[in-house]
Image (cartoon, helix red, strand yellow):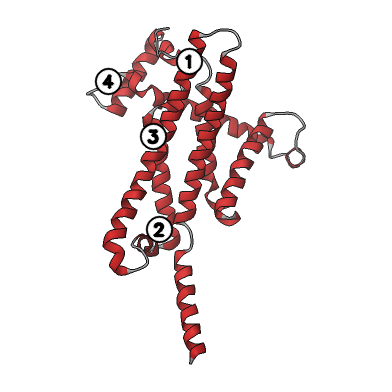
Amino acid sequence: MPKHTYWLTYLLEKVPALKANAHNLGESIIGHQHPDYRSTEPVITSMLYMGILLLLAVIVRGRLTNLKEAAVPSDKLTLTTFFEVLVGYFYDMAKDVMGAERAKRYFPLIGSLALFILFSNLIGMVPGVGSPTSSLNVTLGCAIIVFLCFNYYGLKENGWHYLKHMAGPKWYLAPLIFPIEIISTCVRPITLAVRLMVNIAVDHLLAALFLGLVTLFVPIPVAFLGLIVCVVQTIVFCLLTTVYIGLATEPMHHEEEHGHGHGHGEDAHAH
């Protein structure tokens, strides 16, 4: 296969029907100005991987319906135990950041991102298979979902106090603090997307170079380091997502009411 060509590209090139459908998909996603389906290959592969993950989730969910098997953990590494360990780790992380109640409420988003990003990172380590998270189109899509969700959660939980909190503690500081808060909030999805994309793209590029230049046992440490990068970047993305949701959904109006009540109590005590 040519350089920078994956098995999916090769398959699309050799099967006319698949190539025509991919070409039409490329036109629908990026427009008639650039109708090359290769530009949409990360999006196509991410959709394919999401379908695989959904199938695996349905299989694991079906096995967990048996309460006796679900209550007793298996002594072997199975698909069910793998999902249990993975989901349990990220749930514990979310619970440590935002508490058990909010972690349970918002974990579907965090857990879904963890599964998709980790799977997309690791799949790129297979020779000839592309990693969707090495494309800014995919990582920016994930980051925009996070951005929309944590702002929606913040407005839903705190109402106008969510925006008031961005203006700072004093009204005369609002013209200075509010624009800074808005800019820093809007920068969050960009940093999330670029950090993940750059680390995964560089990691897989270095791994491919070592695999192509060096033989025998030398690529094994490189592959191990690549595995660490894939896992760490998943944790970083999900941890920052958890922090953003935790900050947005923190009960701000309760703190203000508690502060006013405490002030009135001190006044009454003074009188």
Residue 13, horizontal then vertical, whole percent: 38, 10
Residue 109 placement, left or right of 184: right
C-beta proximity under 8 Å, tags 1 and 4: no
Label 2, on which residue? 155
C-alpha span from label 2 to label 4: 39 Å
Give the residue displayed 26% in from the left and 27% down from the top: 31
Counting residues from the start of the chain, the first of labels 4 and 3 encountered is 4
Badge 4 vs badge 3, beta-carbon distance below 8 Å: no
Q: Which residue is mark 3?
A: 194
Residue 111 in the image, given as x and y percentages of width and height: 55, 41
Mark 4–mark 3 distance (CA, rounded to whole Å): 25 Å
Q: Is residue 77 left or right of residue 211?
A: right
Label number found at residue 145? none
- The residue tagged 4 is 35
- What separation in Å lies between label 1 and label 3 (alpha carbons)? 21 Å
Point out residue 131 in the picture as x, y percentages from the top left corner: 46, 24
Element type at marker 3? helix
Can you name the residue that lies furthest to the bottom here? 271
